[in-house]
């Protein structure tokens, strides 16, 4: 049982604030992904959980125990590093056994655990090799096996797949998901890759400028972004945003189209819609086609709407040409509204 | 011009220089060591080894190296670990530690002579504090042990920094992730040092130890300044054979012996601290 609670954790490096008052609770056996662009503080937060970094303020709890004064080795965690950190002077066997030897487990138990995790990660034939004789993907497997062999309460992963090529990444992603689910550990996984985050996570914590903007299930984060940043960061292509002016109470004018919306005191808010949530038809947002990108299952069309960039995902059977004037009708249930000042969803 | 030949061509002048001013004189010395009056003989080595001072000379030299080098290694490792961990003031610390490197070995010997001399700093301090009534003869011919200790101190003071500088550079090459991984996987600071830092530092350790051991067998000026003839060492004896006893052939033999010992230890450390190709960083 290892629930992780991060309570009011902040981190300052000199005059720079890397984390502002972060609060996050991760349930036992949950797979939590910290997602954000580089420099958003996600790795710093992970390193604070690991104990490799000391928070400037706040508390860290793992499994009901306060750990922020404990060294990493007493926190019941294991970690997979971005560059794997597979020790070059030790064989694969000794790398996986490293933590077990530090715990002074009997040789029999060490062998049992190394062999079991090596088998799990399909590297049992590499046990006698050194890191210099392994490919990147194999080193990755060793790093994961070394973490699993500890049978930890918590596994922390710092962009573990970012150094692999695309095909290998896809394969490892699926494998990691299976292995970690079976190991029943709580996982915190840092990545800047939204596809990785969506496919692995039970919950995603989207981070931006040292804050957690939204922590929710992948579908929730995608469908109901809590802030403009989340909508613009998640989704490929990202959400479209258009200015909305007040037409009447609860009704807004967007590019000449009047749409029902939230009641607000503001005169202007922002309208947002995902590219796949519009349909070309008789009525809708007036758009002039600028670029057409056929992607196979569908066609990505980049248009001008009121002088701004607007992307639409249309069926691949749609016949459009550059310069065409389209009417793009947003699906009413998929429209989202943002306050332009707070950038929060309304 | 053929591009492949260019690097060799550029190395030619330096290679020629070494051949003319190093290899050729070296061959001459080797020739002198094995000949007398133009005839091949091992007599020069017999004369050298037959001298009543020879056993003490070899013993003193080896003993000095055996005591000084491990102490220096331990200190250099400790200092390098501390310096590597500094976040600010790292270069200032390096400069200060490296000051003795800028001083010649004779000057270093003289500095320590000024400390241990009959009227030196140490005696002045002791009598000012009322600990002794009259100066102690630290470096007299009856006190071989205190001469030896003085030489050890001076050598440690003089040449620890060179090892430290090499080790600091070596530690900088070890990616920080290895230490962090070891920390997460349960290694205490001492275990991290023994299980991660030391093995990954092997190439630098090799360089530092070989360099220092060779220097230790060539110890001369510090001993001459502090001990005179009371603590004979190999290099001092070579000097004696050449200039006091005016026997170039035995001096050459003695020089070759030092070279042989240096080569022997170099090969030993190359072998012992070898890093297999597959286990490199």
Image: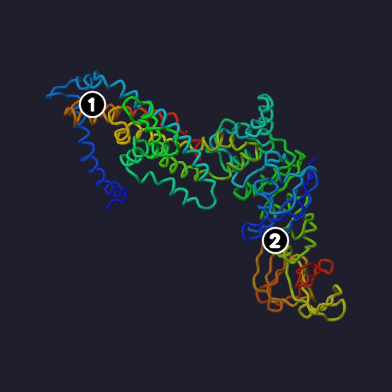
Q: Residues within 10 Å of mark 2 (few under 14, many from 20)?
A: many
Q: Nearer the viewer, residue A56 or A79?
A: A56
Front position in the image: A293 or B2 = B2
Question: Could you tell me residue B203's position as x and y percent?
Answer: 45, 37
Q: Nearer the viewer, residue A339 or B203?
A: B203
Query: Relative to the observer, which residue lies in front, A155 or A230?
Result: A155
Residue B18, located in which quarter of the rendered image? top left
Q: Which residue in the structure is indicated by mark 2?
A: A208
* Left/right of residue B208 with respect to residue A70 in the rendered view: left
Q: Chain of mark 1?
A: B
**x, y percentage for residue A330?**
79, 70
User: How many C-alpha atoms fall within 10 Å of the one at disc 1: few (<14), some, or many (≥20)?
Assistant: many
In three-dimensional space, the C-alpha distance between marks 2 and 1, rounded to whole angstroms, equals 75 Å
Which numbered circle lies on residue B253? 1
Q: In what element is the residue under mark 1?
A: helix
Seen at 21% across and 28% down, the residue is B241
The image quarter in which residue B62 lies: top left
Please indicate whether residue B68 sits to the left or right of residue A220 in the image.
Answer: left
Question: Which chain is disc 2 placed on?
Answer: A
In the image, residue A243 sits, relative to residue B77, either above or below, namely below
Residue A295, image quadrant: bottom right
For marks 2 and 1, give the one nearer the viewer: 1
- Under circle 2, the secondary element is strand
Q: Does residue A259 sit above or below A294 in this rendering?
A: below
Residue B270: horizontal and vertical position, in percent?
41, 31
């Amino acid at each position: 049982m290892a629930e992780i609670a991060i309570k009011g954790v902040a981190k300052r490096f000199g005059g720079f604030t890397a984390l502002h008052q972060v609060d996050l609770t991760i349930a036992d056996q949950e797979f939590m992904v910290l997602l954000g662009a580089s420099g958003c503080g996600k790795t710093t937060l992970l390193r604070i959980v690991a104990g490799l970094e000391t928070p400037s303020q706040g508390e860290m709890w793992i499994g009901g125990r306060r750990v922020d004064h404990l060294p990493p080795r007493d926190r019941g965690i294991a970690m997979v590093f971005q560059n794997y950190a597979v020790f070059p002077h030790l064989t694969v066997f000794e790398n996986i056994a490293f933590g077990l030897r530090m715990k002074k487990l009997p040789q029999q138990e060490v062998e049992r655990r190394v062999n079991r995790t090596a088998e799990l990660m399909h590297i049992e034939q590499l046990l006698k090799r050194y890191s210099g004789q392994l490919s990147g993907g194999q080193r990755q497997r060793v790093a994961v096996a070394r973490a699993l062999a500890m049978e930890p309460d918590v596994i922390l992963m710092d962009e573990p797949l970012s150094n692999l090529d695309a095909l290998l990444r896809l394969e490892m992603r699926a494998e990691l998901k299976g292995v970690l689910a079976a190991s029943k550990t709580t996982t915190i996984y840092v990545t800047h890759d939204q596809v990785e985050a969506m496919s692995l996570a039970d919950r995603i914590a989207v981070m931006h400028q040292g804050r957690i903007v939204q922590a929710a299930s992948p579908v929730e984060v995608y469908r109901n972004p809590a802030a403009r940043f989340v909508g613009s960061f998640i989704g490929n292509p990202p959400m479209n945003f258009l200015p909305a002016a007040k037409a009447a109470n609860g009704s807004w004018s967007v590019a000449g189209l009047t749409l029902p919306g939230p009641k607000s005191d503001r005169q202007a808010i922002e309208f947002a819609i995902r590219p796949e949530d519009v349909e070309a038809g008789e009525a809708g947002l007036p758009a002039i086609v600028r670029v057409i990108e056929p992607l196979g299952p569908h066609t990505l069309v980049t248009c001008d709407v009121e002088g701004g960039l607007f992307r639409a995902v249309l069926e691949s059977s749609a016949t459009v040409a550059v310069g065409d004037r389209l009417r793009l009708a947003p699906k009413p249930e998929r429209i989202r509204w943002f306050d332009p000042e707070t950038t929060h969803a309304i | 011009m053929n591009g492949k030949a260019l690097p060799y061509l550029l190395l030619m002048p330096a290679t020629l220089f070494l051949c003319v001013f190093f290899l050729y004189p070296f061959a001459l010395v080797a020739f002198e060591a094995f000949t007398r009056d133009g005839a091949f003989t091992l007599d020069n080595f017999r004369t050298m080894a037959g001298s009543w001072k020879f056993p003490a000379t070899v013993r003193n030299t080896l003993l000095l190296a055996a005591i000084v080098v491990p102490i220096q290694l331990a200190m250099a490792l400790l200092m390098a670990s501390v310096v590597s961990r500094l976040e600010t003031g790292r270069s200032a610390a390096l400069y200060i530690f490296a000051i003795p490197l800028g001083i010649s070995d004779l000057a270093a010997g003289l500095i320590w002579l000024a400390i241990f001399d009959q009227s030196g700093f140490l005696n002045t301090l002791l009598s000012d504090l009322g600990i002794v009534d009259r100066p102690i003869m630290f470096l007299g011919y009856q006190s071989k042990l205190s001469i030896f200790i003085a030489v050890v101190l001076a050598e440690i003071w003089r040449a620890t920094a060179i090892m430290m500088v090499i080790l600091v550079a070596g530690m900088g090459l070890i990616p920080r992730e290895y230490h962090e991984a070891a920390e997460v996987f349960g290694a205490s600071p001492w275990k991290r040092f023994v299980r991660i830092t030391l093995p990954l530092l092997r190439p630098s350790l090799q360089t530092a130890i070989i360099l220092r051991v060779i220097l230790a067998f060539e110890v001369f000026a510090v001993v001459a300044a502090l001990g005179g003839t009371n603590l004979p060492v190999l290099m001092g004896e070579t000097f004696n054979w050449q200039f006091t006893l005016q026997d170039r052939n035995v001096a050459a033999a003695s020089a070759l012996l030092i070279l042989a010992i240096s080569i022997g230890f170099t090969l030993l450390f190359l072998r012992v601290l070898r890093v297999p190709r597959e286990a490199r960083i």
